[in-house]
Amino acid sequence: MSGAFFPIATLSTSLVAAAIIFLLPEGALRARTVLNLAAAVLKIGLVAWMVRGLSQGQTYAVEFPVLEGLAFVLRADALGIMFAGLSSLLWLFTTIYAIGYLEDSPNRRRFFGFFSLCVASTLGISLAGNLFTFLIFYELLTLSTYPLVAHRGTPKALAAATLYLRFTLTAGLVLMIGMVALHTLAGDIRFGQREILAEFGPEQRGTLIAIFWVLIAGFGVKAGLVPLHGWLPRAMVAPAPVSALLHAVAVVKAGAFGIVRLVYDVYGAELSQALGLLTGLAVVASVTILYASLRALAQVELKRRLAFSTVSQVSYVILGIGLFGPLGTIAALSHLLHQGLMKITLFFCAGNYAEELGIHRIDELDGAGRRMPLTSLAFSVGALGMIGLPPLVGFLSKWYLGTGAVQAGMPWVIAVLVVSSLLNAAYFLPVLYRLWFCPGPDHGVGKWPEERHLGRFETSSWLLLPALATALFSVMAGLLAGLPFTPLEWATRVANLEYLP
Amino acid sequence: MNSAASLLLWLALVAPLPLGLLAWLKPPRRMRAVVLAASALPLATLWLLPRVGEGALQGSLALGGLSLHWRLDALAALLLLLTQLVLLASAAYAVGHRRAALSGDVSHARFWPLLGGLAFALGLIWVAADLLLLYAGLELMGLCAVGMMLLPGKAEAIRAGLRYLIYALVGSLAWLLGVALLLGAWGTLELAGLAAVAEPDATTRIGMALLAGGLLLKAAIFPLHGWLVPVHASAWTPVSAVHGALVVKASFFILITLWRLLLPEAITAAWVLGMLGASAVLWGGLKAWRADSLKQVVAWSTVGQLGYLMLLFPLLAGTAASVAAMAWQATWLQLAGHALAKAAMFMAAGNLMLSTGASRLVDLAGTSRRLPLSLMTFGIAAVTLMGLPPSAGFTAKWLLLQASLESGQWPWVAVLVLGTLLTAAYVFRVLRCSFVEQAPRHEFHPLPRGMDLIPLLLALAAVGLGLVAEWPLAMLRQGGVS
């Protein structure tokens, strides 16, 4: 009974919240705020309960047939709950942030309704128990993010949203064809039933390899793999909380998580290695990392630089998957969470600069550290983490990637890591330098593009607190990495499940 | 027991006629009245459904020297249920529509007997087991449909309606010729008897070709779809909903039934029909994408969506039993999903046009803020048409893809992909217009709440059907691809 209750209840919190938000009138501010926050807190509670239950050996699953030989499966496993935990935690902070960010702007009912739907889809993705269920929520995510990207209704926003749809809907179809082909070949594979494909003989290898790359092409669009990343920088016209959510949790991570599921839970690491798929993934990821870092260097807008940085950083996850062995897996899974925490912090901060001071370009940031010290501190934590400075979480990811590369016998990956870290430093350190060391309007040089005084502190507390909280989380996740229930420890647990029989 | 079930079935089939007449004399003023009066019909079908699971209900009616055969199997019962639900929704919607759009229009009362006749005709078609009964149903349906299209009484409505009438009559003529050939060659009109004796010789082929031509014309299958879009342009919203959701599909149903009895092995001809369907998907999608007015988008989308159904022919002809079973289930699921979604979409589009008083896409600017519910309904209905999860369209597409891959009929994979992309293109073109914020505001007229609620329920049903598809499909499988 309780086994079926928790996955459904967790999914329903955001679905029901979305439905009620759509029914509430536009002006019902307080009711909407309370509902949003209550649903977010409730969901964290439910996910935490499942984390506790899972570590005690409980199972949470529910399923029913949709077609002959094909079921809708929701199941919380160690890997899924990790992603669910990330999304529900960051949902809370993004909701708080969005309430502050969208104060007095139109269409808030639509925004928060689709925002909740978007989170429900992310949760569905993390709890999906087979590829079919995964696809359902993956496409739901596409649909629910469209209105968020198009939110402002300007020609630029509408064009970006259309481009986003072109990429993601086509990718969804490619994904569906791959899944149907796999289903035709092997039937309904539940995540974790790695033995099904492992038993296929050598005559099927060609088909398996082809299906794998079709599926990767489908996932790769959302994960922003070069050359399928084109929609992502353009989608930056969306409001800051949407960018934070798209880039840190929902969309790009859904693609990366799909690849994680495909490699570890459908094909299995050993079969993927035997078929030569992992090396291919590592190469694609390396190209993406380097190319996107170079593009990031050339950007003058803060959000676009962050966007290319996302493209590059998400591929660390893919790179980790490409490294056969537990260390590579740990790197991939922990980076899935680490990058989420760091990147959402950076986007919150970018939004704060834009809201409080009207800053959109990097060269306008001179001296902002004095005007907005806490925001700039949070930004610095995120940026230094991305570069991989110990003891921040980004360092852990890179460390495990490096050792994983040695373990997998792919030493060239270390060169990629070194170059990419240098590039990270090259595009983040100048920003930090401008923030803290260049004289700006608060030192009497020039003036802010559009200064507003939104709150008692350096900006509205609704905007400031989420940024500080996520920055704090990313520091803690690095400092306390050895303790139970941190991202790294849980990733190790999942990696052990994969490699130990 | 069996006779009680038969009696109930015929009561449910005939009941729309007196109900329609009653409503003509005393037009209902509240949606609730319609719902209360007619909801007994789907309930009766629901009661019948488990009883036809084990074996079809059948019998014959004697009219003088003539005996007419009928048969209610799982498929017919499910289609009957679908028909009753969509008609019920449209009837309730029509009450609100008259109040909101046509107050004082006396001709509206004539809508009711025509709707009753249409309901009876559709019921006849689902249960008919001989060519004569099918003919009666087909003609009655066509005449009622034309009558409903003529109701607005405007010049363009009459012109389009008369063109529809001519097309329908040509279709009937071809049908009658085909029936005459078959009767002359095999001496029976009963479907089961015909299947037993008919050989796929030249006469059968020519007869079937004539029947198919007539039915394709009535079903508006590419390239015989010319009459469809103009009639919708000036038709009342509930009429469009009924027509797009049900009427065109009845002809498809007859076609597939006859085809499988008479020419199950005609692979080339089946591929020709499949190719027609593929062209319909592409052409309908392209035209919907380029259309300027909202109603044209929805009407062209019907032309495109009907094409998916035609893929059943090549997937049934000479393929493995598992492929045939998948294609069979996929087609009926697609048909049901499309019926619910298309009715919802016509109603949502009608609401948008009524509230804004404009029909062009560019005039939708700002509706996302002012009419979120109608727009949301349009979007949810579109999810089914695009075949995105978890809708019935998605589940059907999954099955169709699986059937195409398993039988190695690759062209249909491309058709499904292109069709989906085109559908997304025209749907999001509409939604995109509604998101525009800088636009002149026009007056928004409020509509009765039921008019928003009914299409929303239909659209949600189409989406939900994808998740509970196993319930009707298991019943279909039990009946077999028979």
Image (spheres, grey):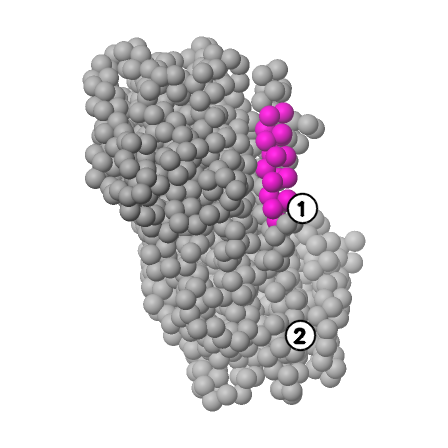
Q: Answer with mark 2 or mark 1, whichever residue precedes in sequence.
A: 1
For the residue marked with disc 1, what is the amino acid?
A: Glu
Please say if B349 is above or below A434. below
Residue A364: which quarter of the image?
top left
- The image quarter containing residue B212 is bottom left
Residue A357, compared with residue A286, is above or below; it is below
Amino acid type indicated by mark 2: Val
Who is closer to the viewer here, B168 or A298?
Answer: A298
Circle 2 sits in a helix, a strand or a loop, which is it?
A: helix
Structural crowding at the residue carrying mark 2, measured as other residues with C-alpha within 10 Å and reported as few (<14), some (14–19) or many (≥20): many
- Residue at point 38% right, 13% down? A326
Could you say where residue B328 lies in the image, as x and y percent from the top left? 49, 49
Look at 73% across and 54% down and name the residue there.
B47
Residue B317 visible in the displayed image: no
Q: Assess whether residue B279 is covered by the magenta stretch.
A: no
The circle drawn on residue B143 is none
Disc 1: CA contacts within 10 A as few (<14), some (14-19) or many (>=20): few
Q: Which residue is mark 1?
A: B54
Q: Which residue is mark 2?
A: B95
Asked whether the beta carbons under mark 2 and mark 1 sit within 8 Å of each other, the answer is no
Placement of A151 over or under A132, stated as above or below: below
- Give the distance between the C-alpha atoms of the residues marked 2 and 1, in whole angstroms: 39 Å
**Percent x, y of residue B48:** 71, 54
Q: Residue at x 60, y 43 (%)?
A: A36
Q: Chain of mark 2?
A: B
The mark tally for this picture is: 2
Tell me: residue A378, above or below residue B22. Answer: above
Q: Majority secondary structure of the magenta segment?
A: helix
Magenta part of the protein: which range?
A: A32-49
